[in-house]
Image (spheres, grey):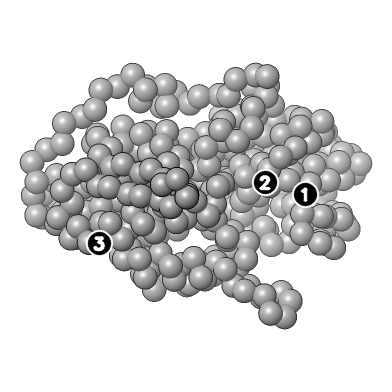
């Protein structure tokens, strides 16, 4: 097995000593002194990277389980009057991480925190965002209600599976995008010319692919597919010219890898010169990494919204991980100082 890629930021964080927290000020714009950053067990390395970029230490908190599996949370420092940010992607094990998040929110609400912002790099249950068949739940809405009722006053998410999930919350939601981060990687790697084509693996991802194509100044293609059942996909047609092109497939998440692999095979059958893939959330359930490694995909580029290296071994020659820690740290800083978050994406490409 090849050991996982560790980003440069992660390697620095592991060696850096904690930065002393400045004195507390009540005015958010005057100082980050009342900003407190906490994390559960879902993705501690990402939270440490965010703390590094913010120049603040991670807050002291204990999260354990009783013998019957009940989660216990104990905040080990005062949170009264503080602007609290909780970093907790609700990734696998989804139910444990979600419940831990809800308990942490309740703990800070009862500890009289001034504001409680949940930072959800990955929003679990996002694919259950609408009713497709009779008597189905809309679980993405239920999760939003649970977070709100627990006491969160704001949420920060990265590349939600469906945009309408923002409307499921009754609190402000800052929706961040990893597209520019991925686009910068491809530009640095020499893509972004007439020989490159950005491909959406389904009709629902056209907006995402269009944005990437505009950043890279390339053409776009769309793979039309249907799902006879969950995690099963059938390619129907490819819309757009991919012959002789370096194709970059982009999706918000990769789970089993079926869609991206079948799409890559279809692109090669249509004459593509090479196929690459990128996504924000590497869910990568059992067998996905091997499936991708055996496919025509030459490289998969993803981010660390999910603790990727804890899920599956990484083939260093085929998979690269980019960190969203700088993006999240900048968003947290702007929220804390009541500045615009949308300005993060105002860059002219």
Residue 273: x, y in percent?
A: 83, 33
Q: Which quadrant, please, contains the N terminus? A: top right
Local crowd size for mark 2, using a 10 Å CA cut-off: few (<14), some (14–19), many (≥20): many
Name the residue carrying label 3: 109
What element does badge 1 sit on?
helix
Question: Do callouts 2 and 1 mark residues in contact (Cβ within 8 Å)?
Answer: yes
Local crowd size for mark 1, using a 10 Å CA cut-off: few (<14), some (14–19), many (≥20): many
Q: Tell me which corner region of the image, top left, top right, bottom left or bottom right, holds residue 22.
A: top left
What element does badge 3 sit on?
helix
Q: Compare marks 2 and 3 and give the one earlier in the sequence.
A: 3
The nearer-to-camera label among 2 and 3 is: 3
State the residue in front, 148 or 245: 148
Q: Is residue 246 visible?
A: no
Q: Compare marks 3 and 1 and give the one earlier in the sequence.
A: 3
Name the residue carrying label 2: 254
Q: Tell me which corner region of the image, top left, top right, bottom left or bottom right, holds residue 297.
A: top right
Q: Compare marks 2 and 1 and give the one earlier in the sequence.
A: 2
> Residue, x 31% and y 32% (percent of image)?
52
Q: Is residue 111 above or below residue 194?
A: below
What element does badge 2 sit on?
strand
Left or right: 346 in relation to 59:
right
- Separation of marks 3 and 1 at Cα, in angstroms: 42 Å
Name the residue carrying label 1: 259
The nearer-to-camera label among 3 and 1 is: 3
Left or right: 170 in relation to 245:
left
State the residue in front, 51 or 195: 51
- Separation of marks 2 and 1 at Cα, in angstroms: 8 Å
Residue 275: x, y in percent?
A: 77, 36
> Residue, x 76% and y 32% (percent of image)?
290
Q: Is residue 190 above or below residue 330?
A: above
């Amino acid at each position: 097995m090849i050991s996982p890629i560790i980003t440069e930021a992660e390697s620095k964080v592991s060696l850096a000593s904690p930065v002393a927290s400045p004195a507390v000020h009540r005015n958010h714009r005057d100082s980050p002194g009342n900003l407190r950053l906490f994390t559960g067990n879902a993705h501690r390395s990402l939270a440490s990277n965010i703390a590094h970029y913010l120049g603040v230490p991670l807050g002291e908190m204990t999260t354990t389980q009783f013998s019957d599996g009940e989660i216990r949370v104990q905040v080990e420092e005062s949170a009264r009057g503080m602007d609290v940010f909780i970093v907790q992607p609700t990734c696998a094990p989804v139910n444990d991480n979600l419940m831990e998040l809800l308990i942490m929110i309740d703990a800070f609400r009862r500890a009289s925190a001034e504001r409680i912002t949940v930072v959800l790099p990955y929003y679990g249950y996002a694919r259950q965002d609408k009713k497709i068949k009779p008597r189905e739940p809309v679980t993405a809405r239920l999760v939003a209600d649970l977070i709100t009722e627990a006491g969160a006053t704001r949420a920060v998410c990265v590349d939600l599976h469906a945009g309408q999930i923002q409307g499921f919350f009754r609190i402000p939601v800052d929706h961040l995008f990893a597209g520019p981060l991925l686009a910068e990687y491809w530009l640095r790697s020499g893509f972004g010319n007439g020989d490159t084509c950005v491909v959406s693996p389904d009709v629902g991802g056209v907006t995402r692919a269009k944005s990437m194509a505009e950043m890279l100044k390339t053409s776009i293609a769309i793979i039309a597919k249907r799902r006879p059942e969950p995690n099963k996909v059938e390619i129907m047609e490819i819309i757009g010219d991919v012959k002789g092109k370096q194709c970059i497939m982009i999706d918000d998440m990769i789970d089993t890898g079926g869609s991206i692999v079948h799409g890559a095979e279809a692109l090669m059958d249509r004459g593509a010169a090479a196929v690459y893939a990128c996504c924000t959330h590497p869910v990568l359930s059992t067998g996905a990494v091997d499936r991708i490694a055996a496919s025509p995909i030459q490289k998969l580029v993803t981010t660390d919204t999910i603790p990727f290296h804890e899920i599956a071994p990484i083939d260093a020659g085929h998979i690269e991980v980019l960190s969203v820690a700088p993006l999240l740290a900048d968003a947290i800083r702007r929220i804390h100082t009541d500045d615009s978050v949308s300005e993060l994406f105002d860059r002219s490409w």
